[in-house]
Amino acid sequence: MIDQPAQSYRPGSKDDFDRLYRSTYQRIFATLVIILKSPAAAEDATQEAYLRAFRAWRTWKKDAPAEAWLVRIALNVAFTQRRRERLFEIGAILRRLGRPADPDPTDSMQSDLVRELRALPPKQASAIVLRHLHGFTNREIAAVLNVPERTVASRLAAAKGRLRSRLGERMNTEMGTSMPEPVPLEE
Amino acid sequence: MVNGGGFDQWLEQTLQQETAGRGGPSPDAAQATYHAAYLQGGLQMSGLATAASLISAKGAAGLAVAVLAVGAAGATTETVVTGSANPSNWGQQVVKQVQTCKDALAPGSHGIGECVSTFANQHGKQVSSEHRSSGAPTNHPSATNHPSATDHPGGKPTSHPNSTDHPTGPPTSHP
């Protein structure tokens, strides 16, 4: 974890927020590039996230890492923006009378994992990003999401179950492992 | 065997690869949107928002209940007593009280909700009793025709757009 110790940040301090911004910006931006389609959209969302975070900076509590708190805000911004994009896409389809849009060149550049991650429900995707991209513990995630730790575990399990079922074969190819036949459970 | 550990490892590696080299623009705080908004003074919180941010979630719930209970009864009376329909006077009092309650707490301890709620309740009772004893004219001269208005002083006041323009004016027709 590259984040500064929580004790080193003072809620409401502009200087500390500047420091937090400098130390987390790259990772937050990279995270939002995964969730959103374009780097430009990710940059807008990142700036919006920091603006919201700064407005709420004095309410940040030290029981959760500042970066995790920021990631949560950033993901909320990104998912809101994505919903807007989808509504816009639906509007565009209606305007084209149902004809499909031209293929998006950025789609072919996405990995299967990114595509599947974007298809997850936002809460599950957030849990995966916080846990497996940013490396927070379940306890830290629970604190920042204000949910019980078991809820985090359950969201992670559901998300990974779905990703595994969709991407297991690819993972096996890349890692040179093989998926065993499922063993039926005895009653 | 694809165990959970193997999948987790693959997941982490792939996500790291996906984000590698996607650092984006330079994180210069001076160029950030929040910094620009800060310089323009656009990040000032309102009095009530400040109060809400100062107290804990539990305290906020307690305060909300108290303010709702008092506010509903006092919505009309506040105008009469303070002579202003603007709730910022009350908001400023709450902000001051929140700070007072925080100062009274030991460092590092939480839980000012009760302190603030007590203040809100006292304020509400005071305002209500002042209103009753002063016999201040209601904005609903025909309230006697509507028992619910007196039976439920905590109810939501009905809207009378001209009520502040003519607080002591002749009875207007009740919708």
Image (cartoon, rainbow, N blue to C red):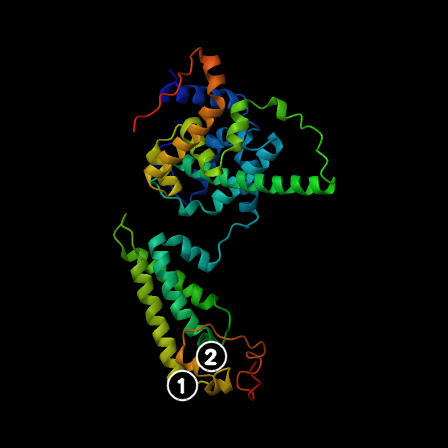
The chain letter under disc 2 is B
Q: What residue does disc 1 label?
A: B134
* Left or right: where A178 falls relative to A32: left
B120 or A180, which lies in front? A180
Q: Work out which residue is located at the far bottom of the displayed protein and give it.
A: B170
Q: Please state which amino acid type lies under the numbered disc 2.
A: Val
Q: Please state which amino acid type lies under the numbered disc 1.
A: Ser
Looking at the rendered structure, the number of numbered marks drawn on it comes to 2
Locate the N terminus of chain A by quadrant.
Answer: top left
The chain letter under disc 1 is B
Disc 1 + disc 2, Cβ < 8 Å: yes
Q: Residue at x 37, y 72 (%)?
A: B124
Q: Residues within 10 Å of mark 2 (few under 14, many from 20)?
A: many
Question: Element under label 1?
Answer: helix
Q: Looking at the picture, does residue A26 appear above or below residue A74?
A: above
Q: What residue does disc 2 label?
A: B80
A1 or A31, which lies in front? A31
* Left or right: where B135 falls relative to A79: left
Q: Residue at x 44, y 44 (%)?
A: A57
B104 or A92, which lies in front? A92
